[in-house]
Image (cartoon, grey):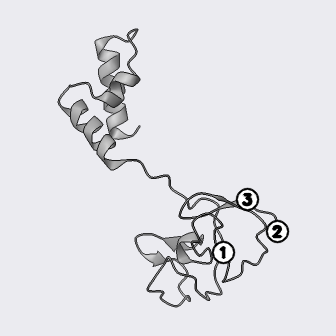
C-alpha cells in the first residue's frame, strides 16, 4: 500500500511507513505517535470515533491498539496565528486597515469591491 501520509501534528511527510501501520510508528520531526485516533479516518473531533464497535480512548493523541485504525491523509490542519487573524477581523469590522490588509492592498479596486473582498475574507469565503 503506497500512501503519502503527513504527520497529524506537524504536517511532516511520513516516509518509509510500513502498512498496516505499527502502533510504534512516530514522526521523525516532532516524535508524535501516528497510530492515534487523530490520524484515523474514523475520528471525528466532536464526537470521537465514528466506528460503533471501537473501544473508547481517553487520549486521542497517544498510540493505541485499535483494530479499526485506518490512516487518513487529510488530518493535518495548518494553524493560523490567532492574534493576527483576530486583529485583521476586528479592523475589518470597524472599516480600518490592518497591517495584514495593507500588504494585500490593491489600489485598482473600487471602494465597493474592496469592502466586498474584506467581507469575504472575514467570513472565510
- Which residue occupies the foreground of this view, 27 or 91? 27
> Element at badge 3?
loop
Residue 3: which quarter of the image?
Answer: bottom right
Q: Residue at x 35, y 30 (%)?
A: 100
What is the x, y in percent for residue 95?
A: 20, 25
| Residue plotted at (29% across, 13% down) | 111
2 and 47: which one is in front?
2
Marks 3/2: CA–CA distance: 10 Å
Return the mark for residue 93. none
In the foreground, 85 or 54: 85
The percent position of residue 35, horizontal first and vertical second, equals 62, 78
Mark identifier at residue 4: 3
Which quadrant does the C terminus fall into? Answer: top left
- Frontmost of labels 3 and 2 is 3
Measured Cα–Cα span from mark 2 to mark 1: 12 Å
Indicate which label's residue lies in the foreground, 1 or 3.
3
Determine the residue positioned at 66% across, 74% down. 70
How far across and how far down the image is residue 108, in percent? 40, 8
Q: Which residue is mark 2?
A: 1
Quarter of the rendering containing residue 89: top left
In the image, 10 versus 30, the foreground residue is 30
Work out which quarter of the rendered image holds the N terminus and state it.
Answer: bottom right
Amino acid at each position: 500500500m503506497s500512501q503519502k501520509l503527513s504527520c497529524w501534528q506537524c504536517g511532516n511527510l511520513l516516509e518509509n511507513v510500513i502498512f498496516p501501520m505499527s502502533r510504534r510508528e512516530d514522526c521523525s520531526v516532532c516524535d508524535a505517535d501516528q497510530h492515534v485516533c487523530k490520524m484515523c479516518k474514523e475520528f471525528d473531533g466532536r464526537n470521537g470515533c465514528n466506528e460503533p464497535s471501537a473501544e473508547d480512548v481517553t487520549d486521542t493523541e497517544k498510540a493505541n491498539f485499535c483494530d479499526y485504525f485506518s490512516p487518513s491523509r487529510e488530518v493535518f490542519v495548518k494553524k493560523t496565528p490567532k492574534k493576527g487573524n483576530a486583529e485583521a477581523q476586528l479592523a475589518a469590522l470597524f472599516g480600518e486597515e490592518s497591517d495584514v490588509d495593507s500588504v494585500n492592498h490593491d489600489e485598482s479596486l473600487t471602494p465597493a469591491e474592496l469592502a466586498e473582498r474584506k467581507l469575504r475574507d472575514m467570513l472565510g469565503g
